[in-house]
Amino acid sequence: MSAPFQKGIFFGEPGESHSVIDSSQMFSCSLRFRVFVLTGCCLVPGVALTPQTEGVFSHWKRVSETPIVSPTGTDWESAGTFNPAVLARDNKFVMLFRAQDAAGTSRLGYAESTDGVHFTRKYGAVFSPETDYEKGGGVEDPRLVELGDRYYLTYTAYNRKDAQLCLAESTDVIHWKRLGVILPAYQGKWNRGWTKSGAIVPEKISGKYWMYWLGTAGDKTDQMGLSSSTDMLRWTEETDEPVLPRRPGKFDSRVVEPGPPPIVTPNGIILIYNGADDHLVYRMGIVIFDRNDPRKVLYRSEQPVFEPEKEWEKNGQVPNVVFVEGMAKRGNEWLFYYGGADKYVGVASAQPPP
């Protein structure tokens, strides 16, 4: 940070805009983040102090100024290692990261850490393209969720023609059983293109599993959908339009894409998401959905909470990208794992909701 944060004092009733003392310190963080409504944080001008926003993550910072996983060798992970899924398991952090070879084919690599920052690769590529709907482009952009005695992996299968959202299951995060395509491309109430980025809510609501995902609307923009399932295999769309649409003129005007699986709190379902503007600069936002109705939006970031700043986040295979897919709790904070410029893995931290 370029300067310390000052404690702010907020005025007004819930639902009204608030002012903050020491506002000269509001944007002094090198991350250029905006934090919502926790003592000692900044308040975005015009954002109301409500029960919903009181639980949003605060005090964002980079844990490492340099990548924690980088491309290596001349084989399957030589061109890029990025967009990781991470979870805490057996007193360690396990990561599945997307790795690309020189031909552009993607596989998933495995790494472990005891502190959540320093990772050691193991086992080589633990998930490689095998089926017709994966061959050519490969398996991309994993997200991990633990349900009961199983780990579920949502991933994008790309055969250089279509990209489709798929599911696999495991008991050890190393050996995987494919469960097939769960959201086919070019189908749906509003989706007209590919399907990607399945973020599964980690507990049942109203007797069903719920999943946020990415589809392409008729105007060629990528927006967020929502589906439910009773068995994890057959999914039904829950909205006729995107559950979280793009917003012209904002940081998410072109792409609104789920990040890691959300966390469920008494105040709502908190989902970190990735937004891209008309110049395809990727930044991170936050949305809170109703705890009892995952279709209902209670709160949404007006400004991004994290954006590309480091050289390795601005320059790589795709410029100006921070893209979060992994999230794990460490002590009293949460760690967020992201791809930098579609080439590297980085990690940031934030304080959790109360």
Image (cartoon, rainbow, N blue to C red):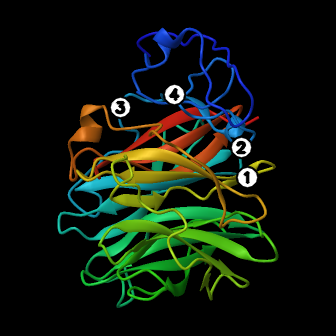
Q: CA distance from mark 2 to mark 1?
A: 7 Å
- Mark 2 Cα shell of 10 Å, populated few (<14), some (14-19), many (≥20): some
Q: Name the image quarter holding the N terminus.
A: top left
Toward the left, the furthest residue is 103
Circle 4 residue:
45
What's the residue type where badge 4 is placed? Pro
Q: Position of residue 185 (x, y in %)?
A: 40, 85
| Viewer-closest of 352 and 13 | 13
Dividing the picture into quadrants, the one containing residue 308 is top left
Circle 2 residue:
52
Dividing the picture into quadrants, the one containing residue 152 is bottom right
Q: Disc 3 vs disc 1: which is toward the camera?
A: 1
The numbered mark, 1 or 4, whose residue comes first in the sequence reads 4
Q: Residue at x 41, y 59 (%)?
A: 246
Compared with residue 10, is residue 78 higher up or lower down, i.e. above or below?
A: below
Compared with residue 242, is residue 73 higher up or lower down, i.e. above or below?
A: above
The numbered mark at residue 268 is 1
Q: Disc 4 vs disc 2: which is toward the camera?
A: 4
Q: CA distance from mark 4 to mark 3?
A: 31 Å
What's the residue type where badge 3 is placed? Thr
Q: Name the image quarter holding the C terminus.
A: top right
The numbered mark, 4 or 3, whose residue comes first in the sequence reads 4
Q: Position of residue 270 (x, y in %)?
A: 65, 51
The numbered mark, 2 or 1, whose residue comes first in the sequence reads 2
The numbered mark, 4 or 2, whose residue comes first in the sequence reads 4
